[in-house]
Amino acid sequence: MVKFLLWCILLILCWPLALLALVAYPIVWLLLIPFRIVGIAVGGVLELVGAIIFLPVRLVRAI
């Protein structure tokens, strides 16, 4: 909702820029998909490394 309100304000102030933003937003969203996938993968690898590092500590606590 906030994005829509900001776009409406931009439409009032500078309608050509607002129309450009309306057209460019899906293209930018598509271009950023690989970076999101890489971010998810890196986050998963970091969680795995953290779990492996803390596994001995969890085993000692369980005893």
Image: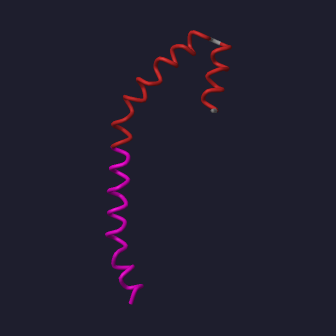
Q: Position of residue 60 (x, y in %)?
A: 37, 85
Assign the N terminus to one quadrant of the image.
top right
- Outermost residue on the top side: it is 16
Q: Position of residue 16 (x, y in %)?
A: 56, 9
Q: Is residue 57 above or below residue 38?
A: below
Q: How many marks?
A: 0
Q: Position of residue 25 (x, y in %)?
A: 47, 24
Q: Is residue 5 above or below residue 53?
A: above
Could you tell whether 13 is left or right of 53 in the image?
right
Q: Is residue 60 magenta?
A: yes
Q: Position of residue 58 (x, y in %)?
A: 39, 79
Q: Main secondary structure of the magenta part?
A: helix
Q: Is residue 30 magenta?
A: no
Q: Nearer the viewer, residue 36 or 56?
A: 36
Assign the C terminus to one quadrant of the image.
bottom left
Residue drawn at x 42%, y 29% as measured from the top left = 29
Q: Is residue 29 above or below residue 17?
A: below
Quadrant in which residue 5 is drawn:
top right
Quadrant in which residue 33 is drawn:
top left
Residue drawn at x 37%, y 73% as measured from the top left = 54
Residue drawn at x 56%, y 13% as measured from the top left = 17
Q: Which residues are magenta?
A: 38-63
